[in-house]
Amino acid sequence: MHDTTLNFGIERLSIGETATPLQYLPNLTKKLAGPKIYIKRDDCTGLAGGGNKVRKLQFLMADALEQGADTIITQGAIQSNHVRQTAAMCAVLGLQCHVLLEDRTGEGDAEFYANGNVFLSQLLGAHAEIYAGGTSMDQAMVHKAETLSASGAKPYIIPGGGSNSIGGLGYAAVAEELVNDAKKLGISLDHVVHATGSAGTQAGLVAGFHLLGVAQNVLGICVRFANEIQKNKVYTLSESILADLNSRLTQKAAQDAYLIQKSAEKLPTERVCVDDRFIGKGYGIPREDTIEAIKLFAQTEGLLLDPVYTGKGAAGLIQLVSEGHFSKDENVIFIHTGGAQSLGGFRQYFDFPEVPRKELA
Ligand SMILES: *Cc1c(COP(=O)(O)O)cnc(C)c1O
């Protein structure tokens, strides 16, 4: 591996934590009786509950400020964690925040539409609007930007999930962090697994490992799209992260010869692995094994997962362990991408009984 510090040729805000812990999970490892399971705590990125979007927003918000924006527009599903983290970042920076929420599933109780991330985004000062499932949300954001511009605002549009060649750099940085974490713990990164949706997390990781000269495959457990589509989305985004980095560094006076060369090197397609068996009926609709995985992580390790992303990711991890996909002497690094703040919107999927009322005899 090349001993390098990744230089992205672009500004990054130091809001929120980087350097999240990589922790061993002894109870879960014992319970599953498979490989050693480690967790990268990106649920601890520090802003309004944390999560993976803070990583991307550190780069995206720097770009927004550089372009003189005073208003941020973004979109997501009703219980979007990305929207919450964007609202938090806007609060810190004193920017107006407009969030467009797509009712993708069309199913949910009153809590789903008002509690969890919806409530938190409002609390953080965002202006929220709900659109019907199937609406072109990119178009809706452009329309919103036109309306706001007409009244004198300077809006900046952040794509869903913050997944573009700027946001993806957040996870290229995590690839470097993981390599250093592993060095500190004296372990090898045999497998890296996480939930993949808008593709920026996986694409960033894949691009980052590539730049570091580490031949690391990354396995994304799909939460929305089938294998072919997701693999293509991730690979294409990885390529554009590398291509845009290459052109930025080439234009800079102080050139980084190693990174210029690496970012121009062809990315092997096998670096991107996906598994779509855990989606169920669709995005945002938990399966039984999603709920079981959430309970297992909570009740063995005291860790809170979510029903849209990490619960499905963990269900995939558990199934792959039981299929013998990993050998017992290997380390599996599960990236906790956050999301527990949505749990309040999904209580109906958990079968806990009402808490009994007692009277002192
Ligand atoms: C957005 C999100 C993901 C998926 O990350 P992408 O970069 O969109 O693929 C995973 N977990 C949680 C909790 C998320 O909010």
Image (cartoon, rainbow, N blue to C red):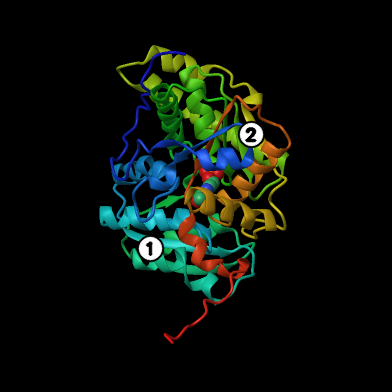
Up-down relation of residue 21 to residue 64 (above or below)? above
Relative horizontal placement of residue 315, taking residue 159 as reference (left or right): right
Where residue 303 sits: x, y (%)? 48, 50
Q: Which residue is mark 2?
A: 34
CB at disc 1 and ligand 1 closer than 8 Å: no
Residue 188 position (above or below residue 300):
above
Q: Which residue is more in the foreground, 195 or 347?
A: 347
* Crowd around label 2: few <14 · some 14–19 · many ≥20 (10 Å): many
Residue 195 in view here? yes
Task: Say if residue 305 shows up in the picture.
Answer: no
Question: Label 1 crowding class (10 Å Cα cut-off): few <14, some 14-19, many 20+?
Answer: some
Q: Residue at x 40, y 24 (%)?
A: 180
Q: Is residue 65 found left or right of 344 in the rendered image?
A: left
Task: Name the amino acid type tagged 2.
Answer: Gly
Which x, y percent locates residue 315?
A: 64, 47
Mark 2: secondary structure: loop
Q: Which residue is mark 1?
A: 148
Query: Could you say which quadrant of the image residue 136 lies in?
Result: bottom right
- Distance from disc 1 to disc 2, alpha carbons, whole Å, reads 54 Å
Q: Which is nearer the eye, 254 or 42?
A: 42
Q: Residue at the spot x=36%, y=24% of the render?
A: 7
Q: Is residue 75 left or right of residue 71?
A: right
Picture coordinates of residue 53 (x, y %)? Answer: 44, 47
Q: Amino acid at mark 1?
A: Leu
* Among the two numbered marks 1 and 2 on one chain, the one whose residue lies closer to the N terminus: 2
- The image position of residue 98, as x and y in percent, is 40, 62
Position of the C terminus by quadrant: bottom left
At 70% from the left and 31% from the top, the residue drawn is 325
Is residue 154 depicted above or below 164 in this figure?
below
